[in-house]
Image: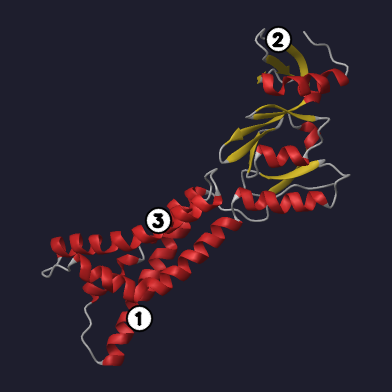
């Protein structure tokens, strides 16, 4: 039995929580380091200013969310890199603007934009580069595209053994195995794939394209850019007289068969000795 699963993944809500805790932790570390540096150099320490300039790390919250969305976009990898660098640069530009506004409103002294910009690059550029690289790596390895590549490599080693089951997560986030023969169809629910099972609808982080290459082509057939159907669950096929077809599944679901995929579907449908209306 071959299992299709994703060992580790982070959903958008989890990314927001993780970025919030991470940013607060970095802010706290920065404040403590400022205090330690002041003691070491025997200089004055002002916690209000330390907190103000430590807001650099709070900007990682929106930055991380943006990076996570960028790396889930169905665009070229080079464009993702460019957009990621744009987020990096925007971070350093927003920081002095934020310091200027906050200091003008809440502090006696207003810190100039260009002065703070130079401070940010001097003090945070190396650490920010390392942290952005780490965040990008984590987002990449937990993205659907990365998981699909690893699954395709596993499938190449078992080319004569099509998938018979797959792992999905239940409401308690526990992995359970379901038989592919029980599945009615797969649907595109960007950035996920919906798995329509008799028990419930599950979500998977692969793509329809990657699944199509792994599933048994005699049973699971692409019928639309948004659907892969289990032909064993089809009980009726009716022409729309324009090249498209409507199919009815055993649970009463009606799906559209696009004319682009109609020929291959009808071939598989007739092979199973079903009646076409």
Name the residue located 71 percent from the left edge and 24 percent from the top edge: 261
Name the residue located 81 percent from the left edge and 50 percent from the top edge: 156
Depicted 126 relative to depicted 247: above or below: below
Q: Secondary structure at mark 1?
A: helix
In screen coordinates, is 7 left or right of 35? right
* Towards the viewer: 243 or 4: 243
Q: Residues within 10 Å of mark 3 (few under 14, many from 20)?
A: few
Q: Position of residue 162 (x, y in %)?
A: 84, 41
- Sequence-wise first label, 2 or 1: 1
Depicted 180 relative to depicted 98: above or below: above
Residue highlighted by disc 2? 239
Q: Which mark is residue 86?
A: 3
Contact, mark 2 vs mark 3 (Cβ under 8 Å): no
Residue highlighted by disc 1? 33
Q: Residues within 10 Å of mark 1 (few under 14, many from 20)?
A: few
The quarter in which the C terminus is drawn is: top right
């Amino acid at each position: 039995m071959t299992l299709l699963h994703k060992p580790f993944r982070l959903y958008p809500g989890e990314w927001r929580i993780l970025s919030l805790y991470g940013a607060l932790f970095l802010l706290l570390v920065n404040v403590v380091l400022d205090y330690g540096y002041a003691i070491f150099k025997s200089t004055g320490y002002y916690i209000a200013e330390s907190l103000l300039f430590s807001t650099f790390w709070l900007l990682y919250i929106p930055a991380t969310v943006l990076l996570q969305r960028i790396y889930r976009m169905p665009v070229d990898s080079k464009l993702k890199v460019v957009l990621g660098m744009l987020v990096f640069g925007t971070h350093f530009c927003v920081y002095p603007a934020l310091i200027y506004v906050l200091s003008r409103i809440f502090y006696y002294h207003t810190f100039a934009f260009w002065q703070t910009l130079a401070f940010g690059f001097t003090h945070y550029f190396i650490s920010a580069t390392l942290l952005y690289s780490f965040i990008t790596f984590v987002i990449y390895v937990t993205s659907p595209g990365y998981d699909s590549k690893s699954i395709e490599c596993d499938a190449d080693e078992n080319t004569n053994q099509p998938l018979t089951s797959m792992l999905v997560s239940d409401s308690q986030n526990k992995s359970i195995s379901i038989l592919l023969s029980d599945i009615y169809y797969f649907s595109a629910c960007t950035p996920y794939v919906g798995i329509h099972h008799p028990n419930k609808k599950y979500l998977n982080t692969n793509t329809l394209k990657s699944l199509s290459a792994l599933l048994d082509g005699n049973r699971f057939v692409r019928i639309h850019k948004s659907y892969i159907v289990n032909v064993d669950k089809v009980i009726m096929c009716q022409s729309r007289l324009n090249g498209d077809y409507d199919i009815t599944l055993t649970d009463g679901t009606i799906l559209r068969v696009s004319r682009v995929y109609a020929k291959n579907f009808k071939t598989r449908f007739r092979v199973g000795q079903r009646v076409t209306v």
